[in-house]
Amino acid sequence: MASIKVKFRPSTNENKEGTIYFQIIQNRVIRQLKTDYLVFMHEWDEENNVITVTDSKRQNYLQSIEESIKRDIKCLQNIIKQLENKRVKYTAEDIISTFQKQANEQSLFNFMQSVIVQLQQMGKQRTSETYRATLRSFMLFREDKDILLEDIDSDTMLLYEAYLRNRGLTKNTTSFYMRILRAVYNRAVEKDLTTNRNPFKHVYTGIDKTVKRAIPLKAIKQIKSLELSLQPSLDFARDMFLFSFYTRGMSFIDMAYLKKKDLSNGILSYRRRKTGQQLFIRWEKCMQEIVEKYDTDYCSPYLLPILKYPYDRNQYKNMLYRTNKSLKEIAKMVGLSIPLTLYVARHSWASIAKSKNIPISVISEGMGHDSEMTTQIYLASLDNAVVDRANAQILKDL
């Protein structure tokens, strides 16, 4: 039976990336299958023929290439198995030509993986992670059997939706996966890789009303007044929740990446990682109290102690998990009936602002929404002072 080996060819320029390729051996005849996977020499373990991560900034990109290599190997193994089952003589060239034919016909797995790698290269880490999670889900549904873009139809998506529902996923979660697959499919259509057969027309791709996630100002006061000095993990989680609320519902990932230099002349400025929109927040005393409480690492460039320096993506994920876990304990302490997470702070700020008759347009601007089409049409821009006065009005009642 034919064998497959992964090899690396370094660039003649040591400052440039080299190329990963597959070595196909059949009947002692060796042939090479080129790939578009590029890594630096120090990112390749020559002894074990595997990628090694040496730079945390490229970790996600390299992991995507590792996944692509594994999938290509599985595809090559399936081709060899099929050729073996036919009980006919075949060569290394036959394996390569069959593989390339399948690649040229553009399968969903391959195309989606290329999109994920592109997102990684563009620095869109969160988006690439959601795409990777969707691909894993669809591959489980397909039992690792790839599908050509041309073969994706309405029946396929209906079966996938039923598969997700049978696994107990909510309507919004199934819609989330469908919207990502639709975005990938539309990108393939734009590239003329397939014709649009509207495969998503019979599946749900909307956003259903969810369980209320906002809590009243009274509950936030209770959380603020808790004595947690002897429980550091709960104390930290409470402070991060309050900081999010103080800053108009700032997301945890934006809080994590706040730099000390982002605070200047009484104004905190940051750019939302989700939308790229830049926001400005007047610095309040309650915000300063939290920062001063944790300002012990003078070498760190970060405003809050969420990430250590140097950092990697796993630091953020672990801290998010631990903080939300602690918030669930806090919820029990104040008798909340809904699950308390960091995202509740954002919902609560908006809900409380609305109850104080603050205009929807001000709330939308304050939270950095860029998908509020009605708001964007109504307001070309909004004076930051209006938003700051709205925030001060809310914080004054705490």
Image: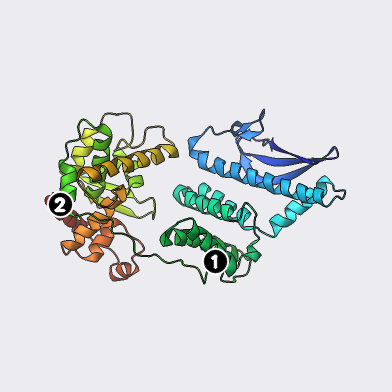
Query: Split into 4 quadrants, where in the image is the N terminus?
Result: top right
Q: Is residue 104 visible?
A: yes
Residue 112 falls in image quadrant: bottom right
Mark 1 crowd level (few <14, some 14–19, many ≥20, 10 Å Cα)? some
Q: Is residue 257 visible?
A: no
Give the number of the mark in front: 2 or 1.
1
Is disc 2 in contact with disc 1, using a CB cutoff of under 8 Å?
no
Figure check: 312 above or below 220: above
Residue 158 badge: 1
Would you name the residue on which mark 2 appears?
218
Residue type for callout 2:
Lys
Q: Position of residue 92 (x, y in %)?
A: 81, 45
Give the distance between the C-alpha atoms of the residues marked 2 and 1, in whole angstroms: 45 Å
Residue type for callout 1:
Leu
The residue nearer to you, when weighing 334 against 241, is: 334
Color scheme of the displayed model: rainbow
Residue 323 badge: none
Q: Position of residue 378 (x, y in %)?
A: 28, 70
Q: Residue at x 69, y 60 (%)?
A: 105
User: Which is more N-terminal, label 1 or label 2?
Assistant: 1
Figure check: 66 above or below 386: above
Q: Position of residue 323 (x, y in %)?
A: 32, 40
The residue nearer to you, when weighing 39 against 197, is: 197
